[in-house]
Amino acid sequence: MPAKTAAIIGAGVAGLTAALSLSRQGIRSEIFEQAEALKEVGAGLQISPNAARVLDELGVLPTLRSKWVEPESIDLRSGVTLRTMASVPAGKAAAERWKAPYAVLHRSTLQLTLRDAVLADPNCTLHLGRRLDASDIPALTLADGSRPDVIIGADGVWSRCRALIAKSPKVSFSGNIAWRFVLPFAEAPPALPKDRVAAFMGPGAHLICYPLKDGGGFNLVAITSGTNAGETWEKTGEPKRVAALHASFAGWNPALRLLIDRNKDLLFWPLCQAGDGAWQNGSDLVLIGDAAHAMMPFMAQGAAMAIEDAFVLARHLAAADVPDAIRTYEAERKPRIARLRKRADFNRMVYHARGPVRVGRDLLMALRPSHSYMADLDWIYGFEA
Ligand SMILES: Cc1cc2nc3c(=O)[nH]c(=O)nc-3n(C[C@H](O)[C@H](O)[C@H](O)COP(=O)(O)OP(=O)(O)OC[C@H]3O[C@@H](n4cnc5c(N)ncnc54)[C@H](O)[C@@H]3O)c2cc1C
């Protein structure tokens, strides 16, 4: 029988989107979230049209559009000379080509908008302050004492649900860390444009910058090499780590270096990724989002994939017996995730290139027409979950 009820572990982007997607299919769900309150954690997010399309289906797009920025373009620039080497049109061009907007916003704005939709939906219940470990899952019941038909592990990169699935993916530290800070608009140098996403590339590091309407300034994320710091989303960097960050930007343009050097509120988090492995147990437990396939942010697609996963899974759960539905979901999603991962690995190499490879990269980028960048993104942004 198709599922009628679900328990969802985790109220991140994946878990909240899953509850709304299930509700559209007439499936009742309860979310169990360890945090006592959903508060600001993480940084800005780029939401690409493939994810925006799902958010539109779920009815939250009008609220989000009032809070986010739809940038004119995504510019790839030199971190040394500041020259724009390539510009991928976004804004109107993205909406026309991929039939949904491309936008940037704070992660908490997305999470809280989804939460409000969940709270307003009679098919969804959110339990806060409910941390579930692997040992709690087999005996998990819903508020009425019944066993859920399906359990959805949406508990992020450090998933506890994953331990209950034989041959599930292993998570490892990637060797990169992400540094994040917000720069008030008034303090920003002219090199930072208010109407577009800028990705500054330099040897061994890159810096992404975009305006946040909901954050009162620019979101800046610097990705560098670094050492692991365990299971954490955000940490203040100790002096040795901050010194290593400054060293990573030593040869960069002074305007950008100054931003990093003078910032005292730098937070970082280690970038971890999940390897290949099973996402479901063949009966009633299935992983979505980072719990299944945490990936490097070089394509800015982790949250987008979590959103797609949730929507696709709900569709299958409404159409087939739970064991078949979770197997079909896994089979459908894996090739797309694998292809994205490859693409992110390629971007990592391109963004952080050094020496002659960097020179070659800059030349090739300058020669490539912008419509060819757009065509190259069709399979990602044009996807209809
Ligand atoms: C630097 C950086 C930049 C990024 N930029 C982008 C971007 O631009 N665009 C994009 O699409 N993606 C981006 N991502 C990826 C994106 O942030 C993640 O893929 C996405 O947030 C994953 O969502 P999730 O719901 O799967 O996991 P999470 O957001 O980690 O949510 C998991 C939830 O489960 C809860 N939880 C965990 N364990 C338990 C437990 N035992 N019991 C109960 N609850 C539990 C947690 O408290 C949390 O609320 C970026 C990531 C990084 C690191």
Image (cartoon, rainbow, N blue to C red):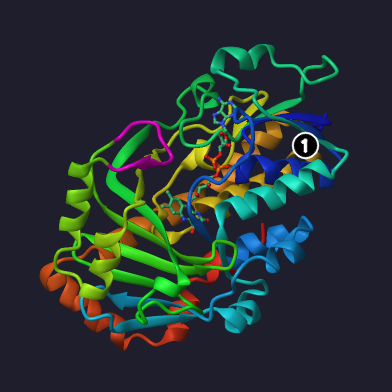
Would residue 315 be visible to someone looking at this image? no
Depth check: give the residue in front, 32 or 185. Answer: 185
Q: Is mark 1 within 8 Å of ligand 1?
A: no
> At x 88% / y 39%, what residue is drawn?
122
Give the extent of the magenta segment: 229-237
The image shows residue 291, relative to residue 251, as above or below, that is above
> At x 45% / y 56%, what residue is drawn?
340
x and y, in percent, of residue 161 in the image:
55, 25
Q: Is residue 234 magenta?
A: yes
The N terminus lies in quadrant: top right
Q: Is residue 166 magenta?
A: no
x and y, in percent, of residue 177 in the image:
31, 47
> At x 62% / y 83%, what residue is drawn?
92
The residue carrying mark 1 is 320
- Please identify the residue farthest to the left as the structure is shown: 355
Secondary structure at badge 1 equals loop
> At x 36% / y 51%, what residue is drawn?
265
Secondary structure character of the magenta stretch overall? loop
x and y, in percent, of residue 49 in the image:
61, 67
Would residue 62 be visible to someone looking at this image? yes
The C terminus lies in quadrant: bottom right
Structural crowding at the residue carrying mark 1, measured as other residues with C-alpha within 10 Å and reported as few (<14), some (14–19) or many (≥20): some
Horizontal placement of 200 versus 157: left or right?
A: left
Depth check: give the residue in front, 281 or 23. Answer: 23
For badge 1, the amino acid type reads Ala
The image shows residue 243, relative to residue 52, as above or below, that is above
